[in-house]
Structure formats: C-alpha cells, structure tokens
C-alpha cells in the first residue's frame, strides 16, 4: 500500500476515533469525518463505501492490535491453552476503553465474532492442518466466545478473580484439546 493511501486511511481512522468517542455510529456524517481528517469526500470514497465499512476496518485494526499485544503470541500451542486464554483476557482488558467506544451501540457478540475470526486466523496460520477440523473449530469458538463474553459481561469482578476462574475453566477443557490434538495427524 502506498504511503499516501496509508496516510489518508490513518487520518480517516484517527478522525473516526475522535468522533466515535462522542457520537453513535449512525450520527457520524461523512462530511464531518472528512473535515476532521482533513481529506475530501472523494478520498473517503476511494477507500470506503460508507461509514460502516470504515467502522469495520477500525474494529479489525483494533482487534489485530489486541492480538499483537499478547506476549509470545507466536508461541501458542494447544498444550498451553490456559496461559494463552489468560493473555487474551489481559490484552482485552488493556483495550477495554477502546472496545467499549467502538462497540457501545452494538451487541457485544459482534465484537466476539470479530475476535473469533482474528484469533482463528492467527492460530490456523501457525497450525494450518487444523483449519478444517470441525472439532477444533468448535472448541476454539467455545473458548474464545466463552472467555470473551464472561470477561466483558462481568467488569465489576476484579481482573485477577476473572483470570483465576478462566484458568480453572481452561484447565478443565485441556483434556478435550488433547483428545482433538491426535486428529491433526489424520488431516
């Protein structure tokens, strides 16, 4: 992607954040967004069809940031699901304010679906032989949505308490992951 294109998209995303912190998504006008980004409407429409497409781009960008904030992200294995789940939860917590701004008008499951998509992309990039494994996809969906929803729905429970509970749950699920693990040699 060219520098000029990236600069325009970066300006649009920054302006979007500025406006989104104050307004609902439906109330943001393309004209005010372009004015805040110091770009014209033609530039906006060269990159996005509408405000919803820009919002989706910003959401995905944030989720990739959340994932990149997970220490040792590339060291993920199915033998360390508990520690990985805890790191995901910590990363989500570090970005809670941004996530709340972006998804305040939407059902939280929308964010969970994006998180699942991003997490599976990361995991299946490292473990491509498991991408079409039905059992693995199901267990990952369960773990990702379960950890995410439980954590986001219970912000009043102290983080360390949530982490202890998630660790216990994930450790209980570890035998299921171990049962699925042999299936990768069959793929």
Image (cartoon, rainbow, N blue to C red):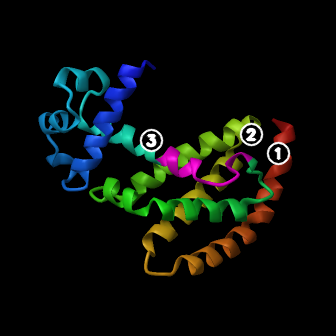
From the top left corner, tell me how far across and down residue 7 is, in percent.
36, 28
Asked if residue 120 is positioned above or below residue 30 in the image, the reply reads below
Neighbourhood count class around disc 3 (C-alpha, 10 Å): few under 14, some 14–19, many 20 upward: few
Quadrant containing the C terminus in the rendered view: top right
Q: Can residue 111 be seen in this view?
A: yes
Give the residue at x 82% y 57%: 178
Q: In this view, does 84 lie to the left or right of 103?
A: right
Few, some or many residues within 10 Å of mark 1 (<14, 14–19, 20+): some
The magenta segment: 63-74
Along the viewing direction, whichever of 21 and 150 lies nearer the viewer? 21
Q: Residue tagged by mark 2?
A: 127
Q: How far apart are marks 1 and 2 (CA)?
A: 12 Å
Tell me the mark number nearer the camera, choosing from 2 and 3: 3
Q: For residue 108: magenta?
A: no
* Residue identifier under label 1: 183
Q: In which quarter of the image is residue 175?
A: bottom right
Q: In which quarter of the image is the N terminus?
A: top left
Magenta stretch, main secondary structure class: helix
């Amino acid at each position: 992607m060219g520098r000029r294109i990236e600069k325009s998209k970066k300006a649009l995303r920054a302006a979007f954040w500025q406006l989104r912190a104050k307004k609902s998504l439906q109330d943001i006008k393309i004209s005010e967004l372009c004015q805040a980004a110091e770009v014209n409407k033609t530039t906006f429409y060269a990159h996005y069809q509408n405000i919803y497409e820009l919002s989706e781009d910003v959401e995905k960008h944030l989720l990739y940031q959340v994932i990149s904030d997970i220490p040792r992200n590339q060291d993920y294995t199915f033998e360390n699901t508990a520690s990985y789940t805890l790191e995901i939860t910590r990363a989500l917590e570090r970005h809670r304010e941004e996530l709340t701004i972006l998804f305040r008008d939407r059902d939280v499951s929308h964010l969970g679906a994006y998180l699942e998509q991003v997490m599976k992309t990361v995991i299946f990039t490292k473990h491509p032989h498991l991408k079409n494994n039905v059992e693995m996809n199901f267990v990952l969906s369960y773990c990702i949505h379960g950890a995410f929803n439980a954590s986001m729905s219970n912000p009043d429970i102290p983080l360390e308490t949530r982490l202890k509970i998630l660790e216990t749950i994930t450790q209980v699920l570890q035998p299921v992951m171990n049962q699925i693990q042999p299936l990768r040699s069959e793929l």
